[in-house]
Amino acid sequence: MTVTYEKQKSEARIQAVEQYLIDNVLGDDFICSHYNSCKSSHADTFYEGQLHHIGKYYGVSFDGRPLRVVVVGQEYGHPPARVDCQARSQMFKYSALDCRFAAGQGYKGRNPHMKGTTNVLRLIFGIPLGTDHQSEFLSIEGKRVHIFDAILNHAFSR
């Protein structure tokens, strides 16, 4: 299987999503027009403006067939509020590179949500289920890319 991506199209796609979020959700202030309805739908503490991770390689193709993986979850369920896309991507980078599926050998383990996300992504990308970190990477045009860097993680509030 050959995995490719079109750098210019991917970068333009990422820029467009980030600009939309800045203009409509979280620029200098939290400006989402759905804030009141989301907040009132959730009885617990509400953490507004927790934006998305958009992997650098979001927009891959497998054997010439485009594959866009969007993982949709609710807000993180913990602080902080108002997390921009770059900060969220740093959280994903930490989980991808500085944590492992299970704790050991000096690494922290991923939380249950990220373990589940890892398993689903393995299956989507044709990687057998397992706990070994080395198999969590794709080869994209000669580069080793963690599966978390080939997705868009969309967190929405209830």
Image (cartoon, rainbow, N blue to C red):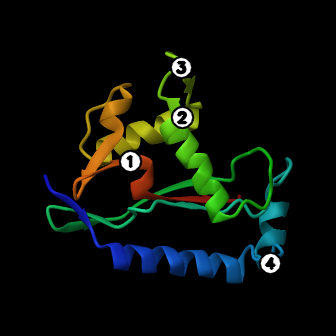
Secondary structure of residue under mark 1:
helix
What amino acid does circle 1 point to? Ile
Q: Which residue is mark 3?
A: 103
Q: To which residue does mark 4 refer?
A: 31
Quadrant location of the C terminus?
Answer: bottom right
Residue nearest the observer in this picture, 23 or 74? 23
Q: Is residue 141 above or below residue 22?
A: above
Residue 74 is left or right of residue 77, and the answer is left
Task: Please determine whether, in this image, residue 106 is positioned above or below residue 25.
Answer: above
Which one is closest to the eye, mark 2 or mark 1?
Answer: 2
Q: Dot 2, crowdedness within 10 Å: few (<14), some or many (≥20)? A: few
Give the mark nearest the N terminus, 1 or 3. Answer: 3
Q: Which residue is mark 1?
A: 147
Q: Residue drawn at (46%, 59%), measured in percent from left and top? A: 55
Marks 3 and 2 close (CB-CB < 8 Å): no
Q: Earlier in the sequence, mark 3 or mark 4?
A: 4
User: Mark 1 or mark 2, which is nearer the start of the sequence?
Assistant: 2
Q: How far apart are the two marked residues, 3 and 4, measured between alpha carbons?
A: 39 Å
Please tell me whether mark 3 or mark 4 is closer to you in this view.
3
Instruction: Indicate the amino acid at tag 2.
Output: Asp
